[in-house]
């Protein structure tokens, strides 16, 4: 389909900004939750193993939503679903702040995973359509806005923690900001060019070996990314032993280089080559986590998290871009298959950390994540779709 009929050249910028705004909303909401995990852990008196078990509610919610989210985006169109998903995602964030029992947190996190996946599928579908209009790779910039939102949200979290603002006030503040952005951006999103239009189309197609390899690269990197989001604060609190006011330092360091790396990712990939960029990314992730595990002190741990952030930054945009080159299925279906495998890794990482920490040590957990992240470098040599 020639999508240019939906967007004259002078309106492409508005479409791009609108889609970027929804990426920003999703990153803002998720990072607000991530920045207050240590507080909620302490409030509910959870052990590392208990927290890891509770965090399983997120991937369970995601996996439960995979078939229905794909069907809804296909049937109703990504434009409607990104609005519904983003509103419910921000609303659920506000509810997290009011939990007082572990079982309540499990239920709300399940819903958070459910709406998060619906938003993720819908907004990436929008991004693919906008990228087709521009005729060049701009996916990294969208993911960069997600990371920038995470960095901004982490800074807001640090500020609120330093002045003892409780999580429920923090989350309501973020939800209101998200609603304001959604209200301004929605009217400029991509029209329903992605709807089924009554034609019978499969919602799921088994990925071939090349797409599976791309999915595994994304999976390994996003296990690391998910672990860093949910456990950075706890690691600095319990392994690095920083004061309470500095528990978000590692998270802020990680988000800072991840954000900068994504905005520089397209330029670096064009200069170095995508395969070499992925190999360097895997080495940086593994090295950064090794430094943080072997030297759990403020300066080296922070430096290690900086390396991890830069390493993680370009993997998913590069993998998504490569998936669009598939010759066995359409770009949209290929992206859906690869992103589903990758995003499961994003949500498995945090529970893995907690479960291993319960039986061994938090540093051992991060070491295992480092090994998985390093596999990105090896797997990138086997991916035929990466040039």
Image: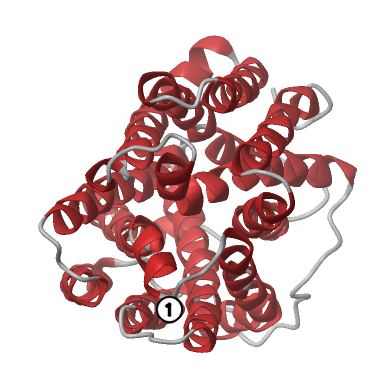
Q: Position of residue 52 (x, y in %)?
A: 61, 63
| Mark 1 closeness class: few <14, some 14–19, many ≥20 residues within 10 Å | many
* Image quadrant containing the C terminus: top right
Q: Residue at x 16, y 58 (%)?
A: 160
* Image quadrant containing the N terminus: bottom right
Q: Position of residue 9 (x, y in %)?
A: 28, 48
Q: Residue furthest left?
A: 163
Q: Residue at x 68, y 80 (%)?
A: 64
Is 360 left, or right, of 183 in this rendering?
right
Decide: is 289 above or below 140.
above
Is 155 left, or right, of 31 in this rendering?
left
Q: Residue furthest right?
A: 209
In this rendered view, identify the residue nearer to me: 335 or 352.
Answer: 352
In this rendered view, identify the residue nearer to me: 327 or 270.
Answer: 270
Q: Position of residue 57 (x, y in %)?
A: 60, 75
Decide: is 7 above or below 50.
above
Q: How many marks?
A: 1
Tell me the residue that label 1 is attached to: 85
SS class, disc 1: helix
- Colour convention of the picture: secondary structure
Decide: is 97 above or below 125.
below
Q: Is residue 327 visible?
A: no
Q: Position of residue 209 (x, y in %)?
A: 89, 44
Q: Residue at x 41, y 40 (%)?
A: 236
Is 130 left, or right, of 197 in this rendering?
left
Q: Is residue 168 visible?
A: yes
Q: Quadrant of residue 92?
A: bottom left
Is 55 left, or right, of 373 in this rendering?
left
Q: Residue at x 45, y 63 (%)?
A: 123
């Amino acid at each position: 389909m020639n999508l240019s009929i939906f967007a004259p050249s002078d309106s492409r910028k508005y479409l791009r900004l609108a889609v970027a705004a929804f990426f920003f909303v999703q990153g803002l909401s998720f990072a607000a939750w991530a920045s207050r995990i240590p507080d909620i852990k302490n409030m509910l008196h959870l052990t590392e193993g208990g927290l890891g078990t509770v965090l399983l509610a997120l991937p369970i919610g995601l996996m439960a939503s995979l078939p229905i989210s794909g069907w809804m985006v296909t049937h109703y169109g990504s434009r409607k679903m990104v609005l519904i998903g983003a509103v419910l995602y921000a609303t659920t964030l506000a509810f997290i702040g009011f939990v007082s029992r572990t079982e309540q947190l499990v239920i709300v996190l399940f819903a958070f995973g459910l709406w998060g996946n619906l938003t993720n599928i819908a907004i990436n579908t929008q991004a693919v359509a906008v990228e087709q209009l521009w005729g060049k790779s701009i996916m990294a910039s969208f993911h960069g806005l997600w990371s920038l939102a995470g960095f901004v949200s982490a800074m807001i979290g640090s500020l609120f923690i330093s002045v003892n603002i409780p999580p429920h006030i923090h989350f309501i503040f973020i939800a209101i900001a998200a609603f304001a952005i959604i209200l301004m951006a929605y009217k400029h999103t991509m029209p329903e060019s992605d709807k089924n239009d009554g034609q019978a189309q499969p919602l799921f197609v088994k990925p071939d070996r090349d797409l599976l390899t791309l999915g595994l690269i994304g999976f390994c990197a996003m296990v690391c990314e998910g672990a860093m989001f949910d456990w950075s604060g706890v690691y600095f609190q319990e392994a690095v032993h920083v004061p309470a006011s500095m528990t978000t330092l590692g998270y802020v360091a990680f988000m800072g280089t991840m954000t900068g790396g994504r905005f520089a990712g397209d330029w670096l990939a064009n200069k170095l080559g995508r395969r070499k960029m992925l190999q360097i990314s895997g080495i940086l992730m593994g090295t950064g986590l090794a430094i943080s595990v072997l030297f759990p002190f403020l300066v080296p741990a922070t430096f290690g998290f900086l390396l991890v952030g830069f390493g993680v930054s370009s993997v998913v945009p590069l993998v998504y871009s490569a998936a669009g080159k598939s010759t066995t299925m359409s770009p949209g279906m290929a992206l859906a298959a690869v992103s589903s495998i990758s995003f499961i890794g994003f949500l498995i990482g945090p529970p893995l950390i907690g479960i291993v920490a319960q039986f061994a040590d938090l540093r051992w957990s991060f070491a295992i994540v480092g090994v998985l992240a390093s596999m990105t470098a090896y797997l990138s040599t086997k991916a035929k779709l990466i040039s």
